[in-house]
Image (cartoon, rainbow, N blue to C red):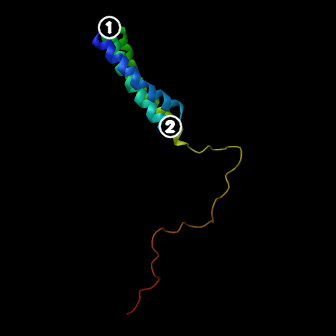
Amino acid sequence: MNGWLIAATVDCAALAPCLYRCAVGAAEERLAALTLAGTVLVALFLLLAQGLDRPSYTDLALVLATLAPAGTLVFTRLLAGEPHQDHARPSEPSGPSGPPRPSGPSRPSRPEEG
């Protein structure tokens, strides 16, 4: 066993909390844990490539480093929660009709004389 494999073992231990958080917690915490797990796995594959003298693991790490951020973007899009448009029914007006009122402090209708 060499130093690269010892470092890979320590890296595997760092992966355990990420995997736990991927399974338990709020959706935002799961997404952050998944992103961190991707980064830890890239480092793990690079350490294993050096420790086992397998260059193919380096290729795997590079592919994972390329695809992990894309996966994060997909899950972020799912978490955004865009409202579902039901095309079967026409949309009903949700407020009073008429022009929208300006938002902000109301101004007096005429200047005060003083």
| N-terminal-most mark, 1 or 2 | 1
- Name the outermost residue toward the right: 89
The percent position of residue 67, horizontal first and vertical second, equals 42, 24
Mark in the foreground, 1 or 2? 1
Direction from residue 79 to residue 92 in the image, left or right: right
The spot of residue 63 in percent (x, y) is: 39, 18
Q: Which residue is mark 2?
A: 77
Q: Position of residue 48 (x, y in %)?
A: 35, 12
Q: Residue at x 53, y 30 (%)?
A: 23
| Mark 1 vs mark 2, CA separation in Å | 43 Å
- View extreme (top): residue: 53
Q: Are marks 1 and 2 in contact (CB under 8 Å)?
A: no
Up the image or down, 81 lies above or below 3; here it is below
Which disc number belongs to residue 16? none
Q: Amino acid at mark 2?
A: Arg
Q: Toward the viewer: 27 or 71? A: 27
In this rendered view, identify the residue nearer to me: 21 or 34: 21
Viewer can see residue 80: yes
Q: Look at the image and tell me whether residue 66 can be seen.
A: no
Residue type of the residue flagged with mark 1 = Met
